[in-house]
Amino acid sequence: MSDDIVFDRSFDLAPGTVDEVAPGVRRLLCDNPGPFTFRGTLTYIVGRRNVAIIDPGPDDDRHIAALTDAVRGETVSHIFVTHTHRDHSPAASKVKAATGAIILAEGAHRASRPLHVGEAGRLDAGGDQSFRPDRTLADGDLVEGDGWALEAITTPGHTANHMAFALKGTGTLFSGDHVMAWSTSIVAPPDGAMSDYMASLHKLEKRPETTYLPGHGGAVRDAPRFVRGFIRHRQGREASLRHRLEKGAADIPTLVRAVYIGLDPRLAGAAGLSVLAHLEDMAARGIVTTDGPPSIDGTYRLDESGRAPLAGG
Ligand SMILES: [Zn+2]
């Protein structure tokens, strides 16, 4: 399995404490560690005196209290949300009530594609269904505050409504869960879509920002090169799936065992969905077939023609 990304899992911020991670950017760690959240969700505070908050975090009263403490004596004008997973957005309404700030995001939570029978429950599990922004943002929108300006960049893939935010004039980008230093991003249908995720990686790779501040874990340095590593990593996974399917039809549990070596059992479900994300993309490109729409229970085989090019090839 080709995997040439060097992950950086060093991270030394304690929950509830604030540090200045870049000039004019503070961060606060929520105490919600786990296999998907690493050490917890990071909330960023941009600016001084008149500030913006990025990803207020889960509906966790201790975190919300620590956040309002961190900005005591300052004015919070904007709350930006990268995406509507429950570890990022639910605190927005309470922080808005406490500060009077407006909430900005791409939009409400939604699936990346129409749901198949039986999928609704899975979408509900991680999504913040009640989230509504006060102002929706489109790709390229620039929001200017007091001493800071953030450019909204649509980066669907992890979720349909995922956005990154570039802090203008600094070479820094808030990457949410799209690009993180400690792990690859979860791309799980129907929330996520692999074709969108790959397009969003290619989009960021071409941008000038070199430091990313993600929703979990430490900063991503030399970011465009790191993004290229993620592109290669997914292309490698697709090649592994294709290699296994050359030996015959397989279901998703079989494919997970074939391509994930030494998988943390807590992540088996996510790995299955990640494989489904690849298979959806490969089916759309005519590389694999299955009966009906690609589903978690399906059996997959290489398309008869089987000669479609590899992703990016
Ligand atoms: Zn997420």
Image (spheres, grey):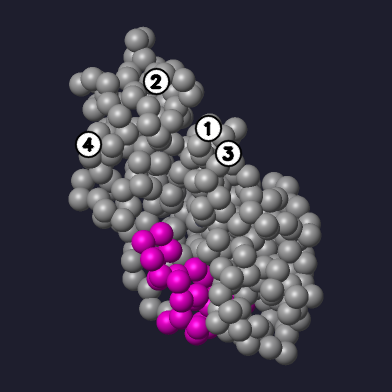
Decide: few, some or many residues near mark 2? Use Cα within 10 Å; few <14, some 14-19, many ≥20. some
Residue 100 spot, x, y in % from top left: 79, 75
Q: How far is the residue under mark 1 from the one under mark 4?
A: 27 Å
Q: How far is the residue under mark 1 from the one under mark 2?
A: 16 Å
**Which is nearer the eye, 27 or 122?**
122
Q: Secondary structure at mark 2?
A: loop
Q: Work out whether mark 1 precedes mark 2 in sequence or the reverse, and give the earlier one.
A: 1
Q: Which residues are magenta?
A: 14-42
* Amino acid found under the numbered disc labelled 3: Ser
Q: Secondary structure at mark 3?
A: loop
Q: Is residue 34 left or right of residue 201?
A: left
Q: What label sits on residue 112 in the rendered view?
A: 3
Q: Which residue is mark 4?
A: 258
* Position of 105 relative to 293 (above/below): below
Q: How far is the residue under mark 3 from the one under mark 2?
A: 20 Å
* Amino acid found under the numbered disc labelled 4: Ala
Q: Does the magenta segment cover residue 55?
A: no
Residue 53 spot, x, y in % from top left: 66, 71
Q: What label sits on residue 290 in the rendered view?
A: 2
Of all residues, the one furthest to the bottom in this rendering is 73
Q: Work out whether mark 4 precedes mark 3 in sequence or the reverse, and give the earlier one.
A: 3
Please tell me which residue is depicted at 62% across the width and 65% down the height of the picture. Answer: 90
Q: Work out whether mark 1 precedes mark 4 in sequence or the reverse, and give the earlier one.
A: 1
**In the figure, residue 253 lies in which quadrant?**
top left
**For the residue with label 4, is its CB less than 8 Å from the closest atom of ligand 1?**
no
**Which is nearer the eye, 309 or 284?**
284
Report the mark closest to the observer, 1 or 2: 1
Q: Is residue 266 left or right of residue 52?
A: left
* Amino acid found under the numbered disc labelled 1: Val
Mark 1 in CB contact with mark 4 (< 8 angstroms): no
Secondary structure mostly taken by the magenta-highlighted segment of the chain: loop
Q: What label sits on residue 117 in the rendered view?
A: 1
